[in-house]
């Protein structure tokens, strides 16, 4: 039955090795999938390096139906936003390609929509359509890779598009494995970052099983303040999130990214910056300050530039590296928290 076929883009090297009865053939198949130009869109009768009888087993068990690029928008700063439509059910999800310094980064979605209710995020307004499969996550990479500008090959992936990755952890872990496995795309684990709103059990499992970077979207420094922005704080308070990061730093050289969307008059005071430094004691962390990207109907607004710089200075002087993220792709609603399937 065709419906039960697996997507080739969602298979690990180990699974393909089993299916093809040979690691050498599995490597050849992955090279074909990830290195052919243009990106293959169906499974041909034969591919280089794999005996036809063995390949026939893959054709029987798998299909290759990539999502359709429904909209491709290029911003004035070179950022490109893709709105994908799933082959199976036309579910919509988005990716953002960000070229910089001779390489590109892709911000991928892990869900179509999101079920977390972060008050400052446009995706939250959509609600959840469904989880994406690993095959659909890897397909975002495949399609964007062939569209990356010459001289800025796609080398980094961040799970900061639509969705909460740790509400779809099995598929996200599988996608990370595929993106980092040989022979291609073979990204280094340090070139993949998974960002979470702070789903504690998912964080624990991720840290046990995966070497990719973890980014925590902290966004506030007291539980009361954070719960207003991110209601799940009532379930997983800040102290528990920090406790996990602190324990994970013992005996490992893991570095954590802490994301902080800085909001005008809400979490941008000197006291917030000082509390942030306190919270991060004993944690090898780098703070990324994210200017808020406004959208219609959002009750929060971007902090003023001089406030952001003062905040950054306090955190930095407290001994914590603190970078100010520049916003990219704003003119096409491709910046953080602006992915909301607008079709205009
Ligand atoms: N659910 C995951 C990943 C998606 S959000 C997470 O919460 O980490 C990716 C990043 O964008 C998060 O750090 C989030 O805090 C930030 N973000 C969300 N909405 C934003 C907005 N409107 N402006 C700026 N950053 C935003």
Image (spheres, grey):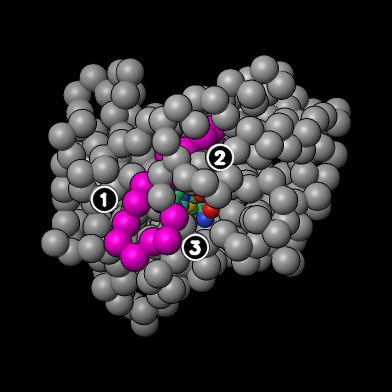
Q: Give the dominant element type of the magenta stretch: helix, strand or loop.
A: loop
**SS at circle 3:** loop
When the figure is inspected, residue 155 is found, relative to residue 110, above or below; the finding is above
User: Which secondary structure, mark 1?
Assistant: loop
Q: Mark 1 highlights which residue? A: 333
Q: Alpha carbon of mark 1 to alpha carbon of mark 2: how far?
A: 24 Å
| Drawn side of residue 160 relative to residue 81, left or right | right
- State the extent of the magenta-drawn residues as a range: 288-300
**Spatial separation of the CA atoms under disc 2 and disc 3:** 16 Å
Label 3 sits on residue: 119
Give the mark nearest the N terminus, 2 or 3: 3
Which percent across, then down, holds residue 229?
A: 57, 59
Q: Which label was assigned to residue 268?
A: 2
> Does residue 233 appear left or right of residue 59 in this picture?
right
Task: Tell me the quarter of the image containing the N terminus.
Answer: bottom left
Q: Is residue 278 left or right of residue 307?
A: right
Q: Quadrant of the C terminus?
A: bottom left
- Whether residue 95 appears in this view of the structure is yes
Residue 159 placed where, x, y %? Answer: 48, 47
């Amino acid at each position: 039955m065709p419906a039960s076929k697996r997507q080739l883009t969602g298979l690990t090297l180990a699974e393909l090795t089993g299916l093809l009865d040979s690691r050498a053939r599995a490597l050849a198949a992955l090279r074909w999938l990830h290195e052919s130009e243009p990106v293959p869109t169906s499974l041909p009768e034969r591919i280089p390096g794999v005996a036809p009888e063995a390949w026939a087993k893959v054709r029987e068990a798998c299909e290759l139906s990539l999502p359709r690029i429904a909209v491709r928008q290029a911003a004035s700063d070179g950022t490109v936003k893709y709105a994908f439509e799933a082959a199976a059910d036309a579910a919509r999800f988005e990716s953002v390609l960000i070229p910089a310094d001779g390489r590109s980064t892709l911000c991928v979605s892990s869900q179509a929509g999101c079920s977390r209710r972060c008050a400052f995020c446009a995706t939250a307004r959509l609600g959840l359509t469904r989880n994406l499969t690993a095959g659909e996550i890897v397909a975002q990479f495949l399609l964007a890779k062939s569209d990356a500008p010459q001289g800025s090959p796609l080398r980094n992936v961040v799970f900061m598009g639509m969705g909460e990755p740790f509400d779809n952890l099995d598929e996200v872990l599988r996608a990370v494995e595929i993106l980092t496995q040989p022979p291609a795309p073979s990204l280094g684990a340090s070139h993949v970052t998974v960002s979470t709103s702070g789903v504690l059990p998912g964080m624990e499992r991720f840290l046990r099983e995966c070497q990719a970077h973890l980014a925590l979207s902290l966004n506030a420094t007291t539980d009361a303040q954070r719960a207003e922005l991110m209601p799940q704080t009532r379930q997983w308070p800040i102290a528990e999130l920090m406790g996990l990061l602190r324990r994970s730093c013992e005996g490992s050289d893991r570095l954590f990214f802490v994301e902080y969307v800085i909001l005008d008059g809400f979490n941008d005071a000197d006291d917030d910056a000082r509390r942030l430094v306190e919270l991060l004691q004993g944690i090898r962390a780098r703070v990324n300050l994210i200017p808020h990207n406004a959208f219609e109907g959002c009750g929060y607004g971007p902090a003023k530039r001089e406030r952001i710089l003062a905040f950054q200075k306090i955190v930095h002087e407290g001994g914590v590296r603190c970078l100010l993220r520049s916003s990219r792709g704003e003119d096409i609603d491709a910046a953080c928290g602006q992915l909301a399937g607008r079709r205009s």
